Image (cartoon, rainbow, N blue to C red):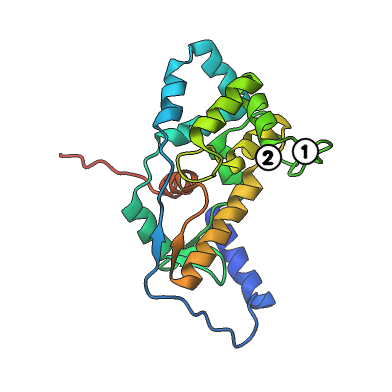
Amino acid sequence: MKDNTVVQIWSEKTQLEKGDSLMEGYTSELWDFTRISVTQNNLEELIEIWVQWDDEVKQLFYCNYGDLLYLLDIKVDKHLFRALAQFWNSAYSYFTFGKVDLVPTVEEYTTLLRCLSIQADKAYSRAVNVLTYVKKLMNITGMSEQWVVEQIKEKGESKSLGHIDEAVSDLFDILDKMVTPVSAILAETFRSLNACRRMGEGRFIGCAQLLLAWFLSHFWKVDKVSF
């Protein structure tokens, strides 16, 4: 473990020696203001399911999926998120706050999610038999095929807001295989922020709750003390 000052000196020295990673003559063309939509799914149904579980089932979920469920408690502050997006530097893929550069890392996201069962070095899995959407939901929920089919029929086949997205079922599917989803979540965050900043608008497609949790983890609230 190195002191922050030592790391900063090393990085500045390395950049001076190696040069910039961008091509010579590159100019960053970004919109002065980026309109980002952070419309999210209605999570009330998931919260109701969680409340109905007893302590034993909840503990089993924690053992398998870590602190993933705590993301339900994080309220996405749209104003904070939109303000945060203005500081995203697409050229270097990090946030620039004055002279301070910050970027979420695989290690930080892994720590925040605390998925103890996943293997940090196992990012891929080879699917021998690709399961259908119905079979995936059966594996995740532990319910019968009839129950799953009825749920899909009730919700509709589309993957719009308010429905279980196939990406969500894939997430739990790879977690069951002890594969880390962090690298994919991180890449999706970078890709979406870059796309929104370059276009000057767009909908953020990524885990906004996790990004905000990372952002807030770097800022400490100091209580005012009267003497």
Which sits in the foreground, 142 or 83? 142
Residue 202 quadrant: bottom left
User: Taking 170 as reference, is 41 left or right?
Assistant: left
What's the residue at 51%, 53% (across, down)? 205
Q: According to the image, label 1 marks what residue?
A: 130
Q: Percent x, y for residue 130?
A: 77, 38
Which sits in the foreground, 83 or 98? 83
Q: Which of the image's four quarters has the C terminus? A: top left
Q: Percent x, y for residue 73?
A: 40, 33
Q: Of the residues shown, which amino acid type is indicated by label 2?
A: Thr
User: Taking 168 as reference, is 213 left or right?
Assistant: left
Residue at far left of view? 227
Return the disc, 2 or 1, that comes first in the chain's sequence: 1
User: Taking 33 as reference, is 103 left or right?
Assistant: right
For marks 2 and 1, give the CA distance.
19 Å
Secondary-structure class at tag 1: loop
Q: Of the residues shown, which amino acid type is indicated by label 1?
A: Val
Q: Is residue 13 above or below residue 44?
A: below
Which sits in the foreground, 117 or 130? 130
Secondary-structure class at tag 2: loop
Q: Is residue 134 above or below residue 57?
A: below
Label 1 Cα crowd, 10 Å radius (few <14 / some 14-19 / many 20+):
few
Can residue 8 be seen in this snapshot? yes
Disc marking residue 225: none
Residue 45 quadrant: top left
Q: According to the image, label 2 marks what residue?
A: 180
Instruction: Give the foreground label among 2 and 1.
Output: 1
